[in-house]
Image (cartoon, rainbow, N blue to C red):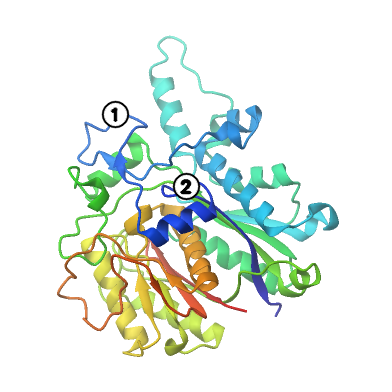
Amino acid sequence: MKRVVITGLGALTPIGNSVDEFWESAVKGKNGFSKITKFDPSLFKTTFAGELKDFAPEKYLDRNEIKRSDPFTQYALCSVTEAFGDSGLNLDTISPFDIGVIWGTGQGGMKTFEEEVKNYTQGGMNPRFNPFFIPKLLANMASGMIAMKFGLMGINYTAVSACASSSSAIMDAFNYIRLNKAKVMVTGGSEAPITEASIGGFSAMKALSTRNDDPQGASRPFDEDRDGFVMGEGAGALILEEYEHAQKRGAKIYAEIVGAAMTDDAYHISATHPEGIGAIKAMQLAMEEAKLNPGEINYLNTHTTSTPVGDLSEIKAVAKTFNNDLDNLKISATKSMTGHLLGAAGAVEAILSIKAIQNNIIPPTINTTKIDSNIPTSMPIVLKEAIDHNVNVAMSNTFGFGGHNATTIFKKL
């Protein structure tokens, strides 16, 4: 099996439009929540979200790229552009067939779908759809347009596993390189879910926080008073590279991917298994592949979204997986700052895990003031402020509707 390393990162999040801004904000414990500006949210129980700040697609993309793409694809193109720049790869020196793209998204072109259906129904005697309707809404279009923009002709598809989508994409990209099917893979995920349909739909499920009088304090993972997640938008991109290929060209290497696994709870369409059975197995399988014991994991970025059921099931799974082998472990739930980026969550949290390895800093869980009494007091959760901590190995969990569980493990070289 080939070894796989990360040589480039790109991020577009509610707390930063680049990796450096994103990391700096996360370390400072900032969040990006405020009243929704993309539409009038007054008809909904939740009126706030984590929107991108000062994002203008024309700064990054040409007119045709914008015209032909949904925001989720635009976010993908922007984050991948940063990641390629960060990687230092000269695409002219690599066969285009040796570079693939596996992207993740949960909803795809939701904004396009919503707008086009509205326009059609309001079309009177001459209803019609925009000719770009189908290409813009397709979930695979981000991976396709990344390939077109950069001339990448290798493996190309999109992983869709709800909120585990980008972690699934990273795992697949990792495996294709390990199997010598590619030298370089572009991977990650993007989501543009701050639309009336998405906010309305998740609100109807009672999944979103309704703390409208305190948006910035609304995402409070593990807290006794948590009442739901905060929707976020954006993208995270990673350039994965075969280790010897990266070494030969003198690439900067952030970390190595050493283990990844997926399971399914087979339990409920939206709720996680209350005892975290599938999550436990995903973490165990990832560690087994990485040839690591629980005591060797230094940082766990949890999926924890600030929902009453989900937070507790994951922490139960962590407690059983690590079985009190917690001396070297620190845990944080960074959705308290970014909100939940759905299909892009795994990618942006992978970036924070990798940056934690690079900097030996654990970003905090903010807003949590009183830990749920059902959570073991032994859990080493980092609250309020970032801390210095030696991070040799980081684990990232992401879970999705449908019971999908994904765990990835990154290690310092």
Q: Position of residue 20 (x, y in %)?
A: 53, 55
How many residues crowd around disc 1 within 10 Å: few (fewer than 14), some, or many (20 or more)?
few
Q: Residue at x 51, y 23 (%)?
A: 129
How many residues crowd around disc 2 within 10 Å: few (fewer than 14), some, or many (20 or more)?
many
Q: Is residue 236 left or right of residue 64?
A: left
Q: What label does residue 234 carry, if any? A: 2
Q: Is residue 308 left or right of residue 16?
A: left
Count every numbered label the image shows and give the total.
Answer: 2
Q: Where the N terminus falls, by quadrant?
A: bottom right
162 up-or-down from 317: above or below: above
Disc 1 marks which residue? Answer: 40
Q: Residue at x 56, y 61 (%)?
A: 169
Q: Amino acid at mark 2?
A: Gly
Q: Amino acid at mark 1?
A: Asp
Q: Position of residue 105 (x, y in %)?
A: 49, 51
Q: CA distance from mark 2 to mark 1?
A: 20 Å
Query: In front: 134, or 326?
Result: 326
146 up-or-down from 393: above or below: above
Q: Is residue 207 visible?
A: no
Q: Is residue 117 left or right of residue 240?
A: left
Q: Where the C terminus falls, by quadrant?
A: bottom right
Decide which of tag 2 and tag 1 comes sooner along the chain: 1
- Secondary-structure class at tag 1: loop
